[in-house]
Amino acid sequence: MPPKERLNVRLNGEAAVGKVVLKPDDDVPDGFNILLQRCSAKLGCQIVKLFNTEGFEVDELEVIDAGDTLVAVREGEAFSRGAIQSSVSLSSLSTLTHIPS
């Protein structure tokens, strides 16, 4: 049996609120709704949509890869880059090797 795929899920608009969630297998019936339920349970609120870090809505398990970071959105909210700004900024800093003077 292959290892379970883990996903990083951040709460929309809140860079400091995130959890690791197990992705259901792609062939599980109603697997995407199971993922939404797992995100809701981990984050302590009702999650209705998931987005990738570029702001595109994700609505199929098959397009999610292990280790992906997703932004979880509650009902009535619009996607906000605030959930990913700090993590993106920090990761881009680590790629700098030389700063011109």
Image: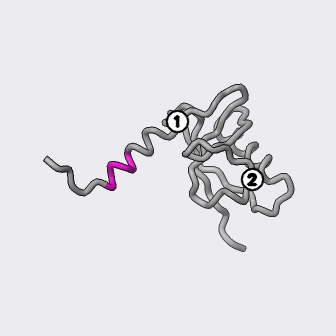
Label 1: few (<14), some (14–19) or many (≥20) C-alpha neighbours in 10 Å: some
Please, what is the three-letter code of the amino acid marked with disc 1? Arg
Task: Determine whether, in the image, residue 84 is placed left or right of residue 55.
Answer: left
Depth check, front residue: 89 or 10: 89
Task: Determine whether, in the image, residue 62 is placed left or right of residue 89.
Answer: right
Depth check, front residue: 5 or 73: 73
Q: How many marks?
A: 2
The residue furthest bottom is 1
Residue 27's quadrant in the figure? bottom right
Q: Position of residue 7 (x, y in %)?
A: 61, 53
Task: Determine whether, in the image, residue 81 is placed left or right of residue 47.
Answer: left
Q: Position of residue 81 (x, y in %)?
A: 52, 36
Q: Position of residue 10 (x, y in %)?
A: 57, 41
Residue 42's quadrant in the figure? top right
Q: Are marks 2 and 1 in contact (CB under 8 Å)?
A: no
Which mark, residue 81? 1
Residue 1's quadrant in the figure? bottom right
Q: Secondary structure at mark 2?
A: loop
Q: Which residue is mark 2?
A: 60
Q: Secondary structure at mark 1?
A: loop
Please, what is the three-letter code of the amino acid marked with disc 2? Glu
Q: Position of residue 62 (x, y in %)?
A: 72, 60
- Which portion, as a residue range, is magenta? 90-95
Residue shown at 73% from the left, 56% from the top? 61
